[in-house]
Amino acid sequence: MHNAFKLNNIDGVSFLSVPSFDETGLCVTCFSTRLGGVSRPPLDSMNLGFGRGDERETVLENYRILGGAAHFPHERLVAFTQVHKNDVFVAEEKDAGEAFVAQKREYDAVVTNVRNLPIATYHADCVPVLLLDPKRCAVGVAHAGWRGTALSCPAAAVRKMCEAFSSDPGDILVGIGPAIGECCFETDGDVPEAMLSSFGDDVSHFIKRGDNGKFRVSLSGINAFSLIKAGIPQKNITLSRECTCCKSELYWSHRKTHGVRGAMASIIMLK
C-alpha cells in the first residue's frame, strides 16, 4: 500500500494527483484543495459547490481555473447530487456537463470508459476514492461518508466496473484521498455499530473508544479494507493519511468549520 498523493501547484492552484495513476499515462487525476480560486470569505477561495452560498458565476470560474491547471475540460464534467448511498452511475458521452444542470440526479459514485469525459464526486471530510483499470481503460470515482462506507460504496463502484467494462479487480488501481481521520472523527455509537454490522469484527481495530464514551473511527481504513475484500490487491492502493480537519488551511472540512465551508472535488478522466 502506497502512502502519498502528490501536491501540485500550477499557476497558484493547489491540487493533488495520484502518482501510480499518473505513471500509466492513461488518465488525469485531481483532488482539489481550498486554494487557488476566486471565492470570497468565508468560502475562500476554491469552492466547487453550487449549494454553499457562492455566486454561480464564481463557482463556474473556479471550475475553469481548476480545469486549466489540472488539464481537464471542466465544461464536460459529470457529477451528481450525493445522498450517502451506494448507487453507481455509468457515464456516457451524452452525460457530458451533467455537473452543471439545475436538477442533478442522485448518485454517490460514477464510472466510465469514455475518453475526455471527466467524472467527479464532492468532498469536505468524506472519503474520496479514485479507480483506474489500466487494462480495460476504465475509471471510477466514489464518495464515502460514514453511511457510504458502511454500504461499501467504493466497492460497489468496483463491481459496476466489472459488470460494465469486464474489469478484473486484480487490475484496478485505487487512490483513497484526504478525509477526516480517526484523530478528529469523534462519533456516537451509531457509526461503529453500522461498521460492525456491515463488516463484523474484522474492522474493530479501526474503531477506538475514548474515556468520554465517544468513538474514533478510521473511515479511510475501513474503505481500504472493503476494497481489498472486493478483490483489490493491497499493493494497488494509494492511501493518503492526511486529515482534512487537521489541515483545514489546505482542505475544506465540514466538521472544522461547523458546516460553513466550500466543497472540493475528486476528479478523474481518461485521456
Image (spheres, rainbow, N blue to C red):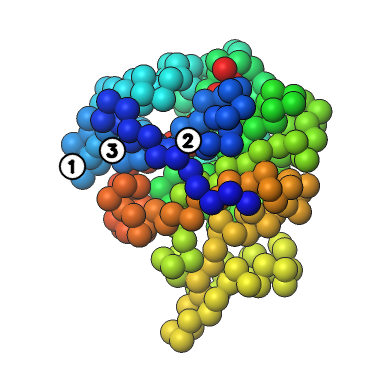
Q: Which residue is drawn at 48% across and 66% down?
A: 182
Rendered residue at 60%/68% (across/down)? 206
Residue beneath disc 2 = 17
| Disc 1 to disc 2: CB gap under 8 Å | no
Query: Nearer the observer, disc 3 or disc 2?
Result: 2
Q: In terms of secondary structure, where does tag 1 sit?
A: loop
Picture layout, residue 56 above or below residue 16: above
Q: Mark 1 or mark 2: which comes first in sequence?
A: 2
For residue 110, side relative to residue 158 (left or right): left
Side of 45 relative to 3 (left or right): left
Q: Which amino acid does label 1 sit on?
A: Pro
How far is disc 3 from disc 2 in space, using C-alphas? 15 Å
Residue farthest toward the bottom in the current orientation of the protein: 211
The residue at 41%/66% (across/down) is 184
Classed neighbour count for the residue bearing mark 2: other residues with Cα under 10 Å, few (<14), some (14–19), many (≥20): many
Query: In percent of the image, x 59 and y 59: which residue is there?
Result: 221
Of residues 235 and 173, the one nearer the viewer is 235
Disc 3 and disc 1: Cα gap in Å?
Answer: 12 Å
Which label is found at residue 172? none
Identify the element where label 3 is drawn. loop
- Determine if residue 251 is in view: yes
| Extreme-left residue of the structure | 41
Quadrant of residue 142 within the rendered picture: top right
Q: What residue type is labelled 2?
A: Ser
The percent position of residue 87, horizontal first and vertical second, equals: 65, 39
**Which residue was labeled with disc 1?**
41
> The disc labelled 3 sits on which kind of residue?
Leu
